[in-house]
Amino acid sequence: MKVTLPNGLLDGQDLFNTAIIDELRGRQQNYLADRELVIGNIGHIPKILSDCIKSLETAEGVQWKGDMKDAVEKLSAGDIEILLIKIRENTYGERFYFEAQCTHCEHKNKNLRLNLNELELDPIPVAEMLDKSRVTFTLPKSQVEVELKPLFLKDLFESIKIMKNKPDRLVTSAVALSIKRIGTKTKITSEDIDELPSKDIIFLKEKLEATKLEGTIDTNITVECTGCGKEFESKLDVYSSDFFDPSKGSTSTTT
Ligand SMILES: [Zn+2]
């Protein structure tokens, strides 16, 4: 299956934004059954991606020559999400059944159906991706320049570690993951954000909301509750190993 990535891998002059993907096979089923990899973790994701991406190509058909494991590290979250969705689709088809709890009345809506091939893509033009001025801001209080960045695979692992081990640092850690540099300092951690004035942190959060840092696939789903009739938003969790459960496809879930 051929997949067009909303961002792609930029290497020198070449943008590798077409992926040729395989389906899940026995080897990947082993990853999904490995509790250490998947329970409260996303260890299966780099393994599935580097196995299932058969080739990364430019629009002109030039192939990425490096190790696929390195390529996976350089893909942003939007690309990772669409690749996981397309690998699922290529394996079991586009149909996907899920459950979602209503945010108004807490009713558990079951057997909700979604067609994975109908999720909307929101790509980012290369010129915008390369334009640093779009993602560079001066903090209002400390008057230092900050540059924002999308999340990469290591940031996704980091955010899971933070939620598990340091829930008290959630605010500053989440902001830190999306910052490429503060002034001339790179490798930003939550300790750097701890030192910032609150006014600057609020400014940063607003900018993170409003700035398009990468191309994405829309995994938000609007559900009409069968309990109270109101609409609520649910999000497809493509990072859970459960996303690759075949029972979510061909027939409805029975539990
Ligand atoms: Zn409801």
Image (cartoon, rainbow, N blue to C red):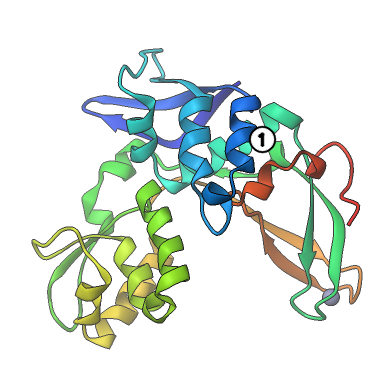
The residue shown at (20%, 80%) is: 140
Quadrant assignment, res 23: top right
In the image, is the residue at mark 1 within 8 Å of ligand 1 by its beta carbon?
no
Looking at the rendered image, the quarter that the N terminus falls into is: top right
Q: Amino acid at mark 1?
A: Arg
Q: Position of residue 241 (x, y in %)?
A: 63, 47
In the image, farthest residue toward the bottom: 198
Residue at image position (75%, 35%) is 94
Left or right: residue 157 versus residue 101 is left
Vertical comparison of 254 with 104: above or below: above
Residue under numbered circle 1 = 88
Residue at image x 21%, y 81%? 196
Residue 204, by quadrant, is bottom left
Note whether residue 20 is visible. yes
x and y percentages locating residue 51 in the rendered image: 50, 26
Using the rendered image of the protein, determine whether residue 217 is visible from the camera's viewpoint: no
Residue ID at (91%, 73%) = 227
Q: Depth check: give the residue in front, 13 or 38.
A: 38
In the rendering, at what x and y percent does residue 226 appear?
91, 68
Disc 1: CA contacts within 10 A as few (<14), some (14-19) or many (>=20): many
